[in-house]
């Protein structure tokens, strides 16, 4: 299995506590946050990964180089911001397999990747999304699902309980025609919100720990949890 790691975040909301590095390189207990993602990936048959990077990509390369934890690394470095979709499209051009795992580099959600791959293949999904059940939240949009099929993505609002997009995907490159999309676009708007009506997007719920370091309070909690 090949993986794309989205590591181009500016981390503007973390600037007061983390400076001079991309958000996924924010230090946690003496290691960059990405280190923990690779510790998780190394337990599964992910042998090749592509970093989708932009802001201070040299910091990522200088730390990880071309191999880390036994995983071979390539780099898709954006000279100008391409949006989440454009970054994924560019990184996909450096992959070989039809099904590619895509991971947000600023969230830690150590799901069982083998189970996720089996789910994706058994359901013949165009896109599969790892979902997390949450309570009392307003920071994330929610996902509506019926019999494993995602039927709607809802805007952020307070919910007592619901499912959120955990930021881990498997995308089938043959099912999604990236060539017809522009260089700069949003993965969420142009792919997820459109294919939920046109194609097959399935969701699998996982109960694993979910850490998002996007805001200072949660970043500080990551040190304790990890």
Image (spheres, rainbow, N blue to C red):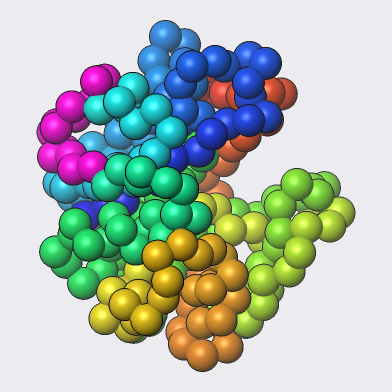
Q: Residue 154 falls in which quadrant of the image? A: bottom right
Q: Is residue 112 above or below residue 123?
A: above
* Left or right for 123, reference 164: left
Residue 150, how many percent across, how many down?
58, 77
* Left or right for 68, reference 119: left
Q: Nearer the viewer, residue 211 or 53?
A: 53
Residue 70, how many percent across, how many down?
13, 33
Q: Residue 209 falls in which quadrant of the image? A: top right
Residue displayed at 64% across by 58% down: 164
Quadrant including the N terminus: bottom left
Q: Could you tell me if residue 208 is visible in this image?
A: yes
Q: Nearer the viewer, residue 72 or 221?
A: 72
Residue 110, how many percent across, how many down?
43, 42
Q: For the magenta stretch, what is the residue range?
A: 62-75
Residue displayed at 35% across by 69% down: 171
* Left or right for 202, reference 76: right
Q: Could you tell me if residue 148 is visible in this image?
A: no
Q: Is residue 55 magenta?
A: no
Residue displayed at 16% across by 66% down: 97
Q: Is residue 72 magenta?
A: yes
Residue 13, how many percent across, how many down?
67, 29
Residue displayed at 75% across by 47% down: 139
Taking the view exactly as shown, the residue that stands out farthest to the front is 80
Taking the view exactly as shown, the residue that stands out farthest to the bottom is 198
Q: Is residue 181 above or below residue 103?
A: below
Q: Residue 33 falls in which quadrant of the image? A: top left
Q: Is residue 214 above or below residue 131?
A: above
């Amino acid at each position: 299995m090949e993986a794309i790691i989205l590591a181009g975040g500016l981390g503007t909301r973390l600037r007061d506590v983390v400076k001079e590095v991309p958000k996924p390189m924010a230090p946690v207990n003496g290691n960059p946050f990405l280190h923990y993602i690779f510790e998780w990936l190394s337990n599964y048959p992910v042998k090749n990964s592509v970093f989708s990077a932009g802001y201070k990509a040299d910091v990522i390369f200088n730390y990880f180089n071309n191999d880390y934890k036994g995983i071979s690394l390539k780099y898709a470095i954006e000279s100008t911001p391409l949006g989440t979709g454009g970054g994924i499209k560019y990184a996909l051009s450096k992959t070989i397999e039809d099904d590619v795992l895509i991971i947000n580099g600023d969230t830690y959600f150590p799901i069982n990747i083998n189970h996720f791959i089996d789910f994706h293949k058994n359901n013949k999904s165009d896109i599969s999304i790892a979902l997390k059940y949450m309570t009392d939240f307003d920071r994330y949009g929610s996902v509506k699902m019926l019999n494993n099929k995602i039927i709607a993505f809802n805007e952020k609002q307070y919910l007592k309980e619901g499912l959120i997009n955990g930021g881990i995907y498997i995308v089938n490159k043959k099912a999604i025609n990236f060539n017809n999309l522009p260089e700069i676009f949003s993965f969420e708007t142009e792919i997820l919100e459109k294919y939920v009506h046109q194609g097959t997007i399935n969701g699998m719920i996982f109960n694993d720990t979910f850490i998002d370091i996007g805001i200072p309070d949660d970043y500080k909690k990551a040190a304790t949890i990890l």
